[in-house]
Amino acid sequence: MGSEIYGSPYGGGAHRAIAASKVNAPAIGLIVIGSLGIAWNLLSLGLYLFGATLTLPSMMGDQDAAQRALSMMHSGFGLLLAIVGLAASGLIIYGAMKMRALTGYGLAMAAAILAMVPGLACWWCCCGLPGLPIGIWAVIVLVDNNVKASFV
């Protein structure tokens, strides 16, 4: 099972407490990344919906068909990105909460990996860059044998 730094990984509450202290900071970082992603994607969703209503009257004007199609595609694509970003951000937060509770190892790992994907949780927001190191940090902590064994 690898080296056991603090005795049996399946030991009592002291070992889980050590694992919990190891996962706490990266999990909080993931919660912050996910929260920033939700805020950014809600803003994006509002802007795309507002922008789509602003382009409808202009589509009735003298624009050529290519510009109308591009405008409609941009609005639809932007809407899709905001919805996917909201879902990804929510999953990052949920996985980080599971990580803090030392439950749902797969979900915690998925949240850490999702946070590393630039532009997924936060399309053009500042959290695209901090998500990478925080996600890497979370993965490094999660692959520790003692931490992994402490998950239920």
Image (spheres, helix red, strand yellow):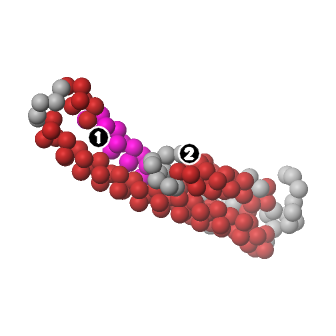
- Tell me how far mark 2 sits from mark 1, CA to CA: 23 Å
Residue 45, x across and y down, in percent? 33, 51
Which label is found at residue 117? 2
- The amino acid beneath tag 2 is Val
Query: Considering only vertical position in the picture, is 31 above or below 79?
Result: below
Nearer-the-camera pick, 134 or 90: 134
Quadrant of the rendered structure where residue 64 is? top left
Residue 83 colored magenta? yes
- Magenta span includes 126: no
Give how far across and how far down residue 108 sits, in percent: 61, 55
Q: Which residues are magenta?
A: 72-86
Residue 132 on image: x %, y %: 61, 50
Secondary structure under tag 1 reads helix
The answer to whether marks 2 and 1 mark residues whose Cβ atoms lie closer than 8 Å is: no
Q: Label 2's element? A: loop
Magenta residues, dominant SS class = helix
| Residue 77 at x, y percent in the picture | 34, 38
Mark 2 neighbour density, 10 Å: few (under 14) some (14–19) many (20 or more): some
Which residue is painted at 26% across and 35% down in the image?
71
- The disc at residue 75 is 1
Q: Is residue 82 visible?
A: yes
Single out the residue that lies furthest toward the front: 62
At 58% across and 55% down in the image, what residue appears? 130
At horizontal 59% and vertical 66% (from top left) the residue drawn is 28
